[in-house]
Amino acid sequence: MKKTFRFFPVILLVFIFSQACHAQVNEYFLGVFSNQANTIKFTIGAYPNTVNQSKRNDGSIYSAMRIAIVNNEHAEPIVWSDYKIYILLKDGTLFYNFLTNATTGEYACKYTVEPGSTHLQLVCFEKIFTGTDVEKIWLSFSDSQFLPLIIYKDEVKPEQDVTSGSTPSKKPLKK
């Protein structure tokens, strides 16, 4: 009986540790922006866990990351026109996305998001990086207007899909 009680805590610790190792953290960056009249009111999400590398026809490699623009149903259409996503890596490297030649689809850099709808875009970067390298993200409408996106973290069980846009938690991560 004594051996059983000594062995039980070891089994319990192994179980707890194995459960903790299987949980993942889903990080994403969000920004909610509007004007005073609320004619412009949208949410943008950037998802570093979707960063992947692709090869061009010439053999060079670039990184792509998914963003989502969600327009409020009572706002005017958003005309998205070559706006930039700036990324600061944990090593201090700062860079922004390049513009693609695509006129339709996920790689297009110019499009309209109608009220009450969502547009998914893949933004492309010359820099090779991973989602875990990302420290901060900004949206830039011009050379002098940078809007920070706030980092959120959700714990995700292995059976949940971490690449789909999850519903954000109510509390942003405090740094």
Image (cartoon, rainbow, N blue to C red):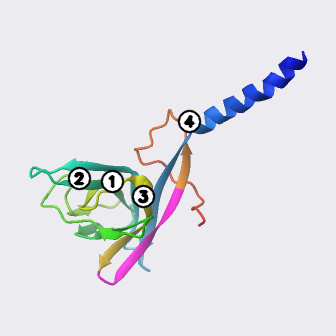
Residue 117 visible in rendering: no
How far from the left and from the top, in percent, is residue 117? 33, 55
Residue 132 position by quadrant: bottom left
Could you tell me the amino acid type at mark 2?
Glu
Could you tell me the amino acid type at mark 1?
Arg
Label 2 crowd (10 A; few <14 / some 14-19 / many >=20) = some
- The residues tagged by marks 2 and 1 sit, at their Cα atoms, a distance apart of 9 Å
Disc 3: which residue: 133
For the residues carrying marks 2 and 4, which lies nearer the camera in this image?
4
Q: Which mark is residue 66?
A: 1
Task: Of the two numbered discs 2 and 3 on the same chain, state the one appearing first in sequence.
Answer: 2
- The residues tagged by marks 1 and 3 sit, at their Cα atoms, a distance apart of 15 Å
Q: Is residue 59 left or right of residue 121?
A: left
How far from the left and from the top, in percent, is residue 39? 37, 73
Considering only vertical position in the picture, is 93 above or below 134? below
Residue range of the region highlighted in magenta in the rendering:
143-152
- The residues tagged by marks 4 and 3 sit, at their Cα atoms, a distance apart of 21 Å
